[in-house]
Amino acid sequence: MNSESTPRPAKTGFNTLAGLLVSSLLGCAFTASPALAELPNVAKPVADKATLNYGLKATKLAGGWYVIAGANDDFSQANGCNIINTGFYVDEAGVYVINTGTSRIYGEQQRALIDSISNGKPILQVVALNLHPDYFLGNQAYPKEALAATKVTIQGIKAEAALYETNLYRLCGDWMKATESVFPSQTIVPGKLRNFGSKAIETIELKGHTDSDLVLFDPDSKVMWAGGLVFYKRIVTTPHARLKPWIESLKKLQGMKPKVVVPSHGPVSWGTEAIDQTLDYLSWLDNRLSQAAQMGEEMNEVMKQGAPERFRNFAAYPAEFYRNVTNLYPVYEKGALGGF
């Protein structure tokens, strides 16, 4: 089961120079190298199923941002179904939160962690970057008036929330206790710049992973919250995906030249490495499915051949790859038959 399906995730070894570069975690800009593509000191969660403790940890990034990393994995009760990166920003007035995780319990533990760092400052806004369940099912822990998303995302959440709840209760068990959907009440209208407290950020609405993929970009620190458009070292999820607009969206993100990218799934990374990797996979997948459909291959044949070797060590392979083919290949087959 994937993090974002309908119906209804560390490396620590680095040399002394790398350690010095990252110890000031990102206050300055450095050009990424393959050895440094993944930020090596981002704290990872350690879930305890017996106590339903997610073991959440916050790592400070450049520009005052904090990331709370999820496991680079598929949904499971062992990891608490916590496979999403969430985050927050604190200024003098209060706190701004990005994504609230998969459950009420996650949201409450996330809120407690944030309160411990912000000294209990008020929560001013809570942003869901898209409609998928691990972006908003922790909303119960936050003031309803602070919950925000784009118009299209709010519509999608309202349409799919009940199905998400049903499937995640079945999959995640006790981690989902007393989880109920709370819909965003603020509508975000994306624009070039908007205030996120004292910080002016770019809010960009793109599409491809879903019909509304919100990206937050801090032009000063060059930290990018790429949402579901970017998966790093993990096979993408595709229940609402359209590959061609997704590919175009990633090209736009490349052009923004971020210094740090926080994907919703997979490690935080330097530069455009995570964007480039997602684009590589999607471009290959788009070409593979197009060629297979033109040749009249059966879906099982596409699955059996699998993905190229460079993608086979990604988290959730091969299961997520099989779901990619199941979700997307019928559209390519229909196109090859002239739309019939």
Image (tube, rainbow, N blue to C red):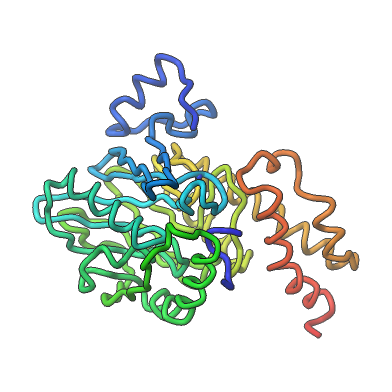
Query: Which residue lies most toward the bottom here?
Result: 340
Q: Position of residue 161 (x, y in %)?
A: 45, 75
Could you say which is closer to the camera, residue 79 or residue 196? 79
Image label count: 0
Query: Which residue lies most toward the left here?
Result: 92
Q: Tell me: 178 left or right of 332.
A: left
Q: Position of residue 28 (x, y in %)?
A: 30, 32
Q: Position of residue 160 (x, y in %)?
A: 49, 77
Q: On the image, which quarter does residue 150 sit in?
A: bottom left
Query: Which residue lies most toward the front here?
Result: 50
Query: Which residue lies most toward the top here?
Result: 16
Can you see residue 27? yes
Who's the residue at 27% across and 62% down the image?
Answer: 193
Who's the residue at 84% across and 79% down the image?
Answer: 337
Q: Tell me: 187 left or right of 153.
A: left
Q: Position of residue 212 (x, y in %)?
A: 46, 70
Who's the residue at 56% across and 61% down the image?
Answer: 248
Who's the residue at 54% across and 69% down the image?
Answer: 167
